[in-house]
Image (cartoon, grey):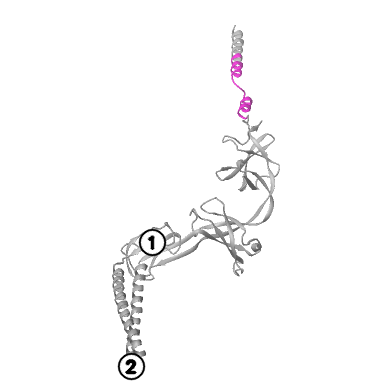
Amino acid sequence: MNQRLTIDTCLLLSLAACGSAAGRDTPAAESGKRGSPPVAHVESVQVEEREVDKTLTVTGTLEADQRSELAANATGRVVRTFVERGDHVKAGALLLQLDTRGAEISRTEAEANAKQITEQLRAVRLECERYVALRDKGAITTQEYDRQASQCATQASSEEAARARLANAARVLQDAAIRAPFAGVIGERFSTVGDYVQPSTRVVTLLDDDPLRLRISVPEPAIAYAREGARVTFRSLQSDAELPATIKYVGREVRPTTRDVIVEAVVDNHEHKLLPGTFVTVQLPVGTQSQAVVPQSALRVVEGGTTVFTVTNNRIEQRAVRAKPRADGLAAVTEGLKKGERVVVNPAADLQDGASVE
């Protein structure tokens, strides 16, 4: 009896164990389910090779085409300012106004004095003409005529002096209005309302920032590629945007210590976004070379760099590359791809490395 109970118990335990095993997947089955790669529907193109510009990276600095520290030409107190730092002004724009009360009084006095002397000179000249007629008739002596002629000359000199004083008074009044000699942007303003200025006192710094001048240092071996009229591109440390410039001047001597030549290019800055003094890196074309190219739509910018998704044996691989966008919608790839490989264009945001491709 005890032996039968033992057999029945074992049988029940065996059945329970089998039922438990049948109710769950084996570790191998679970692994197979979790390891199945997602299936992706993608559009891909073949990596091509094209002739692209070979460039040399050099350094440069953006400079204002004109820079002037404007000084007062008159003595007086500043009564009004019309500009602040960063303001763009046209040629002839009023920047600061000095007190003109003293200058206006001087001009009024000079005008009255000049008018009086001119009227006196008119009367003296009439008298001189009469003396000439009397001399010609022999009605007066030579000495009498000479005295009158001397008086005419003295009066004429007085008129010239009066007109000079009037012109000076007008110039002082004009100089009290400090104006921009050329169009540009205000860099600094050194004087404000209430300041007393005199000739040679700095009042503002004016920069002509459109166009800008790009000053480049070109190494001696690359001088042959720096030609007037040639196009270069540059980018600043503040922006990844690549901008164009045109070479307008190539230095005529190699600097002995640095073994390079100074080259200057013209940069359009009509939007006034580029700042004089900015340090930039410049790409100088030095021939052509064959290079892999892909559509820019194949590039994905991620933290740490740029990647593409390649398709190899129906499997997606995310790969880091070095690429430089071009103006034609393509990107020149300098590292990470070779001709004949396939890349995904316009990859979906959820596309994953290792996905299968139908």
User: In the image, what residue occupies the spot 35% across and 70% down?
Assistant: 170
User: In the image, what residue occupies the spot 62% across and 28% down?
Assistant: 31
Q: Which residue is mark 1?
A: 94
Secondary element type, mark 2: helix
Q: Nearer the viewer, residue 28 or 329?
A: 329
Position of residue 175 in the picture relative to residue 11 (left or right): left
Number of numbered discs present? 2
Q: Amino acid at mark 1?
A: Leu
State the quadrant of the N terminus: top right
Q: Which residue is mark 2?
A: 143
How crowded pointer 2 is (Cα within 10 Å; few <14, some 14-19, many 20+) is rated as few
Q: Residue furthest right?
A: 340
Query: From which residue to which does the magenta span run?
Result: 15-35
Task: Write down the quadrant of residue 16 in the picture.
Answer: top right
How crowded pointer 1 is (Cα within 10 Å; few <14, some 14-19, many 20+) is rated as some
Residue 198: numbered disc: none
Q: Residue furthest top?
A: 1
Q: Nearer the viewer, residue 21 or 260?
A: 260
